[in-house]
Image: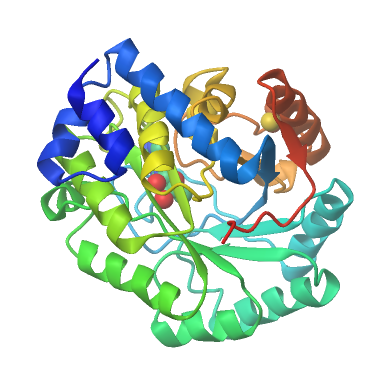
Amino acid sequence: MKDIVETFIKERQLTREEYVELLGCWNDPSAAERLAAEAVKIRKQYYGTKVYTRGLIEFTNYCKNNCYYCGIRHGNHNAKRYRLTKEEILECCVSGYELGFRTFVLQGGEDPYYTDDRMADIVRSIKDRYPNCAVTLSLGERSYESYKRLREAGADRYLLRHETANEEHYGRLHPAEMSLKTRKECLYFLKELGYQVGAGFMVGSPGQRLRDLAEDLVFLKELEPQMVGIGPFIPHHDTKFASEPAGSVELTLYLLSIIRILLPKVLLPATTALGTMDPKGREKGLAVGANVVMPNLSPVKNRKQYDLYDNKICTGEEAAECRGCLARRVESVGYQLVNERGDAVS
Ligand code: 5AD
Ligand code: FES
């Protein structure tokens, strides 16, 4: 066993150079197993065998940005665009509530149609109807004022992956008008406004080196988000990364364990991208430290259109089917799906 693994388990934090060394052991099975065992121990200490579930409502695939990896980027003229009305969003919540969801995640591209007035109205309507549910937003970069209004309208949480904490790497993944600085600023605004905040990144995105991942870990520790979303990069056929290799499932699992140890109380999803790369990916994620799953509540007619990457799973199933399927999957690895809001423990 490598000393660096034991040092990390003991200190729960390393320097960037040390993270590079720790990450360098990712294909050493003994290191991966040792980290996973520790991660699961910590996860059980805080969350027992509960798995929290979030109903994901992908409400618009219009996006003004042009992130190079993403299938719904503005420049992809093959994407068939859709927007859900407030009524359609509320219908997703009605069926989601019946299925036991107590968190709704409204996720979309950066779509200027959803002004602060429209978005605040949607959030307020959900919170009026379901005061015992959490509303999570995932709408990309907005102004401080905008985040403030949505928070006042009742939004509880916000997901905004930083994608990579290295400036140069950020520049390889995004056009010049986007910047890591703005992204980080948004995350700190959200924290300041009292949102429970989720950051995160893709594993194996083009040009990513272990030292970039090491920077991600340093940044996560500094930000201390309540949630961290990571999943393997998966190429999309209509992007300039179409023939780049996908990210590694094993490295993603290794990072999940590291993040659980780094931020013991974090809410850590076993993501759809992980389930796309490996038919047992989400189960494997839970078995190495993840404690959240985010099945899709979007109307089936639009699911295929929220096409971030190729071969995305769960695009043909009804919400109830995904719920049942996931409940079985979660149980197969010794955990239970629970019908709770699932806030991070304090
Ligand atoms: N592969 C994997 N994940 C992707 N995302 C976007 N495009 C891809 C892709 N090609 C992720 C980003 C974004 C989240 C909503 O989906 O990390 O933040
Ligand atoms: Fe959607 Fe299994 S979770 S079909």
Decide which of 237, 45 is in the foreground and name it.
45
The percent coordinates of residue 130 (x first, y second) are: 82, 68
**Height in image: 139 above or below 290?**
below
Decide which of 135, 287 is in the foreground and name it.
287
Is residue 294 shown to the viewer in this render? Answer: no
Residue shown at 51%/41% (left/top)? 307
Quadrant where the image shows the C terminus: bottom right
Residue shown at 23%/40% (left/top)? 213
**Is 296 on the left-hand or right-hand side of 339?**
left
Residue shown at 14%/45% (left/top)? 16
Quarter residue 312 falls in? top right
Quadrant where the image shows the N terminus: top left
**Height in image: 115 above or below 210?**
below
Looking at the image, the residue that sits furthest to the front is 10
Ligand 2 sits in which quadrant? top right
The percent coordinates of residue 48 (x first, y second) are: 66, 38
The percent coordinates of residue 99 (x first, y second) are: 85, 45
Quarter residue 178 falls in? bottom left
**How is the structure coloured here?**
rainbow
Tally the numbered discs.
0
**Is 49 on the left-hand or right-hand side of 45?**
right
Is residue 182 shown to the viewer in this render? Answer: yes
Decide which of 181, 242 is in the foreground and name it.
181
**Is 328 on the left-hand or right-hand side of 9?**
right
The percent coordinates of residue 208 (x first, y second) are: 19, 36
